[in-house]
Image (cartoon, rainbow, N blue to C red):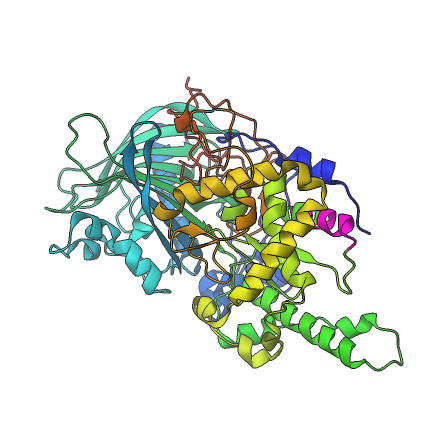
Amino acid sequence: MRTTNWMVTAALLVSLSAAAQQAANSPSPAPASAPDASRGSQSSQQTAAPASQPADAQSAPVAQPLPAPAPTTMEEVVNLFIQHEHDLIKMLAKRTPIVETYLQNLSLDPQLGPVPSEDHYFLGRMDMGETIDRKDYLKEQDKSMEQRLMGGFQKLYKVQYQPLGFSWMIYADRTDFDRNHYDFRYVRREFLGDVLCLVFDVTPKKDAGRGRFLGRLWVEDQSYNIVRLNGTYNPAPRNSYFFHMDSWRLNLIPGYWVPSFIYSEEGDFSAGAKNKMAFKAQTRIWGYDLKRGNKDDELTQIRVDSVTDETPANQDASPLQAERVWQQQAEDNVVERLVGGGLLAPEGDVDRILQTVVNNLEVTNNIDLPRPVRTRVLLTSPLETFSVGNTIVISRGLVDVLPDEASLAAVLAHELAHIVLGHNLGSKYAFNDRMLFSDDTTYQNLGFRHIPEEEEAADKKAVELLKNSPYVQKLDNVGLFLKALQARAPALSALLTTHLGNPLSSNGTVTRLAALSTQGPALDNAKLDQIAALPLGGRVKVNPWDDKAEMVKTAAVAITSARDKMPFEVTPFFPRLSRYGASAAPAAAPATAAATPNPGTPGSN
Ligand SMILES: [Zn+2]
């Protein structure tokens, strides 16, 4: 059963690199199992057009494009990738993936360079079937430049399942990507990860109209699909502004490269620069294979595991057993509902690592619970943990920024303490009617916040659990992490705004595990070997098609200045691209690349 193999996880987690670049050759989980295989139905309809199944569009099998004869000229290559772009737009038109944008406004710190001064968070589902008129988002002339720029984002958050302004960054041009509107110029060949690409510069024709793509495309050299777009839109209407973007796609299903990560950045901190606005933002897209949530679907999604099977036959449940079964039922309902809504990763690799850390705490504290404690990953960026029944949930963003295993143990210990103390929340979700809500209202319908007294008790118990554990030697690191979080907390209120659990801070002051925050050395930016917290995105990678999460395996990159540390910060994406089914990692990771000024692999020939 339980083991104390904490040495193993230590090896996995203890890497203290702040900016780890390369995603790995991981033994990948089956990437994006073809939808027809996972659903086990419609075997005779392998190539049914999505349009023929309007009721359940998302589960329709994805028709693979027919292989085209190999092009012999660059003109033919251009024709092919234009055609494939139209095929992609059509294939994704029935999908409603989740889109998350996390944006940090920047100001200049003399020592650390541009640092976050405030932040914004947006989460929604995007209907990829709607035609977007980009100009719609540029009409509000009375607003400030920043508000206009944000217009699309705000709609994204508030109007879910509606056309979203910034889907313009997913495609070069949703409606007019053709030779009548654009000139294409071949530049060179270049490797992105394992994939050899042809690079093209794209410029709009003279009278092509406003808001046309201007920049560079990378096209893979086997089927000629666009795998990366980098540039902006031009010309902007008067008094308006298009920002720059670097948009990456992954080969998650056969024949298609699916939009997955977008990095945007603006700001000029050179002496005498006029543009005062500066920000950086990460947009992640996932949940492509989620079913469109209608009521019928939701009813079939609610499956209560028959835990009673585990009890001996011919035996009635005692009142205590009944209570436990009831709690298990609520827990299963909530977990299933969160997975169905695209907020929780399916059970996977990361859970096993989290589970090991929890086991280490349990074994060394002689905790023996009637039901095992499980762990799951919330797919979103804001830093939060919560527990429902015996399931501990931790957000992807929080796993990303934790510097080491002891810090991970500390945040998990708080939730384990709630479980040990019997602070069970959420048993009301054992009533199935409470699970009948649409995906976009998940945050309004679920909540796992404890009263302040329980929070205090859990923190106290957590410190006790940690002091009996193998992590007792490393509590200085936990203290350092809490200090780093405190230093950035006033500027990162969106990252610290929790949606389901208790926040780690209150009014800009970190409250979680406060007893440990005085532990350890003082925070010192100048000390390059002191890594108190990591940038976002360096630990967990998510497959945008099937939502599976796995640990990024990165090589350590030397930190050469205080500016390389970037605790809690947004960095550019630089996923290691590979082809679907290749033995290397198919779902490449959004590795942080801030220390790499020119991410383009110079493999030209
Ligand atoms: Zn708590």
Residue 254 visible somewhere in the drawing: no
Residues 80 and 346: in front is: 346
Above or below for 121 versus 530: below
Number of marks present in the image shown: 0
Residue 348 painted magenta: no
Position above or below: 481 against 556? below
Residue 196 position, x and y percent, is 47, 28
Ligand 1 location (quadrant): bottom right
Q: Is residue 550 above or below residue 73?
A: below
Q: Quadrant of the C terminus?
A: top left
Residue 130 left/right relative to 550: left
Farthest residue to the top: give it. 605
Q: Is residue 364 magenta?
A: yes
Residue 97 or residue 39, whichever sits in front: 97
Residue 239: image location, x then y, percent: 11, 46
Residues drawn in magenta: 357-366
Residue 370 in the image, given as x and y percentages of width and height? 78, 65
Residue at the image position 11 percent from the left and 56 percent from the top: 142
